Amino acid sequence: MMAMLIASIAISAGLLALLCLGDPKRRRSIKLPGGVQGTTARRLLTAASLLPGAVFVLMGDAAAFLLWLGGYAVVGWLVTLAFSAWTKRIEASRQ
């Protein structure tokens, strides 16, 4: 069960990182060309990243859902911090 929980958090984290990479506002602010995701792609990625939590809810495993939700929140902060540092490095290299 724990392996499935960790795998589901990792899958959600990967999809969240893809969302950050193609974020139009983030790419526009650091003047990166192309690679902007459309609205449909962003909605599909969002739904896919939340799918493991929905599976835990449908299985009736409240503990696994809450652990996944906490892990997803922590990973969300870590992904945001990583992309923020990446943005600062890109901006500093242009000056």
Image (cartoon, rainbow, N blue to C red):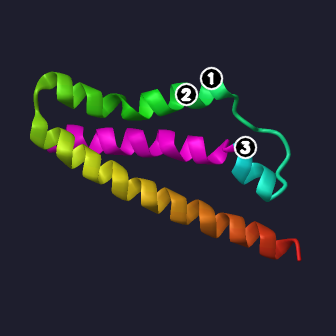
- Disc 3: which residue: 24
- Disc 2: which residue: 43
Q: Residue at x 59, y 31 (%)?
A: 42
Tell me if I can see residue 45 in this picture: yes
Q: Residue at x 14, y 24 (%)?
A: 59
Q: Tell me the SS state at disc 3.
A: helix
Q: Tell me the SS state at disc 1.
A: helix
Residue 51: name its quadrant: top left
The reply to whether callout 1 and callout 2 are in contact (CB within 8 Å) is yes
Residue 54: name its quadrant: top left
Q: Residue at x 74, y 37 (%)?
A: 36
Predominant SS along the magenta part: helix
Q: Position of residue 84 (x, y in %)?
A: 61, 65
Image-based side of 15 in relation to 68, left or right: right
Instruction: Kindly report the distance in space between the C-alpha atoms of the residues bearing marks 2 and 3.
Output: 13 Å
Q: Amino acid at mark 2?
A: Arg
